[in-house]
Image (cartoon, rainbow, N blue to C red):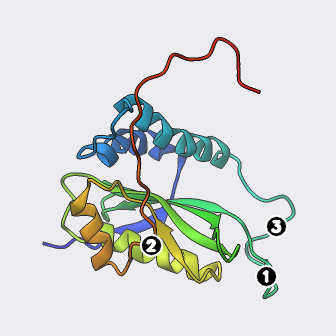
């Protein structure tokens, strides 16, 4: 069965729903040497910052109805969208950011987080959110859309590839023996 969710901008009333979904991002992930609470905090902090600033956020002097960008101008931005049913039942969210490509130095769209409820999984909600991300990136004239995935989450990595994403770089990590913390900061 496939849902046809409505995708709309974040509203302050969505905050508890979004924060309640964040733990789904690490349900199948174990990161050696990191506590789950540390990982959750690193995922929640940017979302909380965005939601706090969204309470009255707008760019000073920019009227979105009349704003135009020259071909060389890029509006660095971030957006949060919520998927819901026509009855208003929330199904998931996607958090989008502008980032700079480390090689070309061009701005590009980045999917910081995408998550759907367990009940909405496999019903087209994630695909609808991805379509919103692509439209958002094209609206901002980005040539690329990126995202990150935990290496151990093969299910989501396969789904990203079915959505047209390709792996570009792989980060390797080697845990080292624990060292006592220095008593004084290093110079």
Q: Residue at x 28, y 40 (%)?
A: 30
- Label 3 environment density (alpha carbons within 10 Å; few <14, some 14–19, many ≥20): few
Q: Looking at the figure, which quarter contains the N terminus? A: bottom left
Asked if 185 appears above or below 156 in the picture, the reply is: above
Q: Which mark is residue 1?
A: none
Residue receiving disc 1: 68
Q: Is residue 16 above or below residue 28?
A: above
Residue at 37% from the left image edge and 32% from the top image edge: 33
User: In front: 86, or 93?
Assistant: 93
Q: Who comes first in sequence, dot 1 or dot 3? A: 3
- Mark 1 and mark 3: span between their CA atoms? 10 Å
Mark positioned earlier in the residue sequence (1 or 2)? 1
Q: Provide residue 123's location: percent of width, then percent of height.
A: 20, 68
Residue for badge 3: 62
In the rendered view, does 109 fall on the left or right side of 61? Answer: left
Asked which secondary structure carries label 1, the reply is: loop
Q: Quadrant of the C terminus?
A: top right
Q: Quadrant of residue 151?
A: bottom left
The CA distance from mark 1 to mark 2 is 32 Å
Q: Which residue is mark 2?
A: 168
- Spatial distance from mark 2 to mark 3, Cα to Cα? 35 Å
Closest to the camera, between mark 2 and mark 3, is 2
């Amino acid at each position: 069965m496939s849902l046809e969710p409505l995708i709309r901008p974040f509203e302050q009333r969505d905050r508890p729903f979004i924060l309640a979904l964040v733990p789904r991002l690490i349900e199948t992930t174990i990161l050696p040497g990191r506590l789950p609470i540390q990982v959750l905090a690193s995922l929640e902090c940017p979302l909380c910052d965005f939601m706090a600033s969204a309470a009255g956020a707008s760019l000073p002097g920019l009227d979105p109805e009349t704003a135009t960008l020259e071909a060389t101008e890029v509006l660095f931005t971030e957006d949060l969208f919520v998927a819901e049913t026509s009855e208003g039942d929330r199904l998931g969210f996607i958090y989008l950011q502008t980032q700079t490509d480390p090689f070309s130095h061009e701005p590009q769209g980045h999917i910081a987080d995408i998550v759907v409820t367990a009940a909405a999984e496999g019903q087209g909600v994630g695909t609808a959110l991805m379509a919103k991300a692509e439209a958002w990136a094209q609206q901002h004239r980005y040539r690329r859309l990126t995202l990150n995935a935990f290496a151990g989450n093969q299910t989501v990595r396969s789904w990203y590839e079915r959505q047209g994403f390709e792996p570009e770089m792989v980060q390797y990590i080697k845990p080292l023996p624990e060292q006592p913390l220095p008593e004084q900061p290093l110079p």
